[in-house]
Amino acid sequence: MKISIITPVYNREDCISRCIESVAIQAEGVEHWIVNDGSTDATLSIVRQFADKYPHIHLLTYECNAGVGAARNAAIQKCAGDYILFVDSDDYLAENAIAFIRTTIKESPSYLHYLFATNGRMPFYETYHLLEQKQTVLTYFDWLRGKVGGDFVHVMNRGMLQKFPFNEELRIYEETNFLKLHRYSKEQLFTNQIIVYTELNRQDSVSLQYRLNNSRAIRLEYIALQNIIYDFYDDYVAAGALAQIHERIRKYRFLAIAVNDYRDDELMPKNQLLQVFKILKLGYLMRMFIIIHSHIKYMFKK
């Protein structure tokens, strides 16, 4: 069983070596795809030194920062592993992590998507009854109903990931991508075992770096909610998760007015937008207010 590890990296000269070395000491049957995402520090030079030393390392590089989604997509299309593991550049693998992953898959080979723990989220897992157990099967409806959530270490079937590339525009709002993967895989096996260690309280962590521009973050969340409502509304209803979808609708209504960095070309096509309005059951005046309000802001930005 071959495992592909994908690590996007942007300006992580201080910690990328630790990540790479944690893979190198357990690299049998592993390929490590490192995607330099337009780094302006010494990151690229460091990765090249490791790539020259270790044959399991493959380097891709972007001249300009394209985001985690684009970096992952590029590596997904090139890697050859049966399963793909994502490891952030400021994280590192636990000792014997790869062996544990292989054992888990061999003992329960019927799943397309496996989930493992990260050290920084252990207290969070304890707040969900389903995640308190050593091992449990999660379903697509569990995610919709809010019975499970949060950050995990994802190990996924390569063919499945190639069917559902990451949205390269939304960057930090990955929920739409993972909901599609959960829907396709139907069930996911969670094992409460730490596979990846995260440096806690790091202020420039990968998960935080795109949250600095508040106006853009608001607009991206607005678009992400549009996609969720349009693509998954019927599934929420089928799962009986009415409170969860209604909360998303409430937040979408707020963001439709509050968004401050509107760009006409990033909104849904008109037919999709009208479908969202239909789902939201917005009155005529509210629909017109959202459209006109957004158009006025767009005109002032020209």
Image (tube, helix red, strand yellow):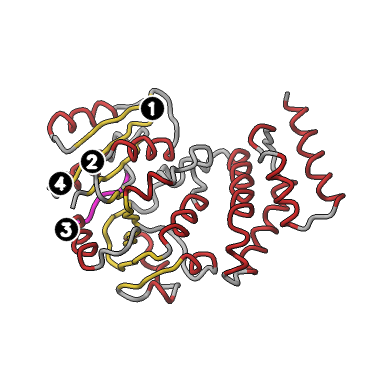
Residue type marked 3: Ala
Direction from residue 267 to residue 59 in the image, left or right? left
Mark seen at residue 27: 4
Measured along the vertical axis of the image, is residue 249 above or below residue 257?
below
Q: Specify which label sits upstream in the sequence, 2 or 1.
A: 2
- List x then y, in percent, for residue 32: 23, 41
Amino acid under disc 1: Gly
Give the quarter of the figure containing the C terminus: top right
Image disc number at residue 32? 2
Nearest to the eye among marks 2 and 1: give it. 2
Gap in angstroms between the C-alphas marked 2 and 4: 8 Å
User: Where in the figure is residue 141, as x and y percent of width and height?
Assistant: 50, 68
What amino acid type is highlighted by mark number 2? His
Task: For the residues labelled 2 and 3, say whether their Cβ atoms are less than 8 Å apart.
Answer: no
Q: Name the residue under label 3.
A: 99
Residue located beneath label 1 in the image: 38
